[in-house]
Image (spheres, rainbow, N blue to C red):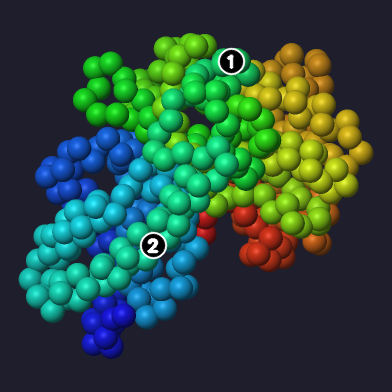
Amino acid sequence: MLDQKTIEIIKSTVPVLEKHGESITTRFYQLMFGNHPELLNIFNHANQKQGRQQKALAGTVYAAAMYIDNLEAILPVVQQIAHKHTSLGVKPEHYPIVGKHLLLAIKDVLGEAATDEIIDAWADAYNVIADAFIGVEAEMYDAAINQEGGWDGFRNFIVDRKVIESDVITSFYLKPEDNNGIAIFIPGQYISIKLEINGEEYTHIRQYSLSDAPGKDYYRISVKREEGTANPDGMVSNYLHDTVSEGDILKISAPAGDFVLDTKKTTPVVLLSGGVGLTPMMSMLKTVVEVQPSRKVTFVHAAVNGNVHALRNEVDELAALDHVNSFIFYDSPTEEDRLNNRFDVEGYITHDWIKDNISIEDADFYFCGPVPFMKAINRSLRDLGVNEGRIHFEFFGPKGNLEE
């Protein structure tokens, strides 16, 4: 536990962190990777280059300072990050390295304002925060290893099938090379894939939502091809699309993630997705159909047009059931889309459409997609009076802020 003086010092730095947080975390990563380039085998290069990781870490450090006297208040954030860490293979021995370079970055950015008293207080606070992460992650690692079909680290899976779902999305059906069982997962969770790409100095790890219901003898991911290979996201997705073939081996981590469907509830569920954000929604939709056949579910998907709309046939089959409704939005439908009545609404999912077409009184809402899409959905739901406890969403990548 921290003494009162240390807590007061940490809280006094909150305004500084609000102003300089991203500068500090940007400098932190520069220093850490400069001294420990081997950590680039763990961290997502794309998130680094695009500034998403720096912004997310700045938010976490700010929240830790704000609630340093009540860290239980940020436990949901700790658990979410811990899921990411265990999926990537972050271990206790990494935390002293992080702590050292975070303190160096604070001193570097703030200069003389970072007094010895402030640095000492943050050193004590970091140790408490790190212990919290290490404890939560130890429980997650134990659960992943000890469950039926579980494993530690990365395990070899064979690409059993590779299926083109649209012009930009391809599904990969993955089965364990050792033919042993695989861990169950909760719909909405993801796995990490570790890739060693020819010509690349470091491994690349990417997390992909599982796009089928649990309980199968395979995992399925559905990957969007990101344009160009100049950026790290494009490098990995293009490698999967163009180079990985059926029969190839991929290294997979055990399922993780806290954006999950609550199957204990029987109230209606509404699943809203944009683009490749439909992947966790597919897992949720199929799970509701399989294990909660009387639960009403509405599946709403937005895409540019039919050429990039993946997994449509699977949704259409399920939409024939009495308790399943499906709506498709295309913002730029093709002539073929129009001719074959492939969509329900032209344009975007709006506040008014949700109000007129969705019964919101007791439904739970889950959504995923591009950040502008999620901001619009979140704003609409809140404006319609949906309380925070019934709103659930997932960022592909570091956690962001939908209220900005």
**Residue at x 29%, y 29% (from the top left corner):** 203
> Identity of the amino acid at label 2?
Gly
Mark 1 to mark 2: distance in Å? Answer: 38 Å
Most extreme residue toward the bottom is 4
**Residue at x 69%, y 54% (from the top left corner):** 262
From the viewer's side, name the closer residue of 379 and 283.
Answer: 283
**Residue at x 65%, y 58% (from the top left corner):** 391
**Residue at x 39%, y 38% (from the top left corner):** 153
Residue 81 shows up from this direction: no
Q: Quadrant of residue 275?
A: top right
The residue under label 2 is 135
From the viewer's side, name the closer residue of 290 and 305.
Answer: 290
Decide which of tag 1 and tag 2 comes sooner along the chain: 2
- Residue 253: numbered disc: none
The residue under label 1 is 161
Q: Residues within 10 Å of mark 1 (few under 14, many from 20)?
A: some
Horizontal side, residue 219 vs residue 253: left or right:
right
Q: Quadrant of residue 12?
A: bottom left
Q: Residues within 10 Å of mark 2 (few under 14, many from 20)?
A: few
> Residue 303, percent across and down?
64, 30
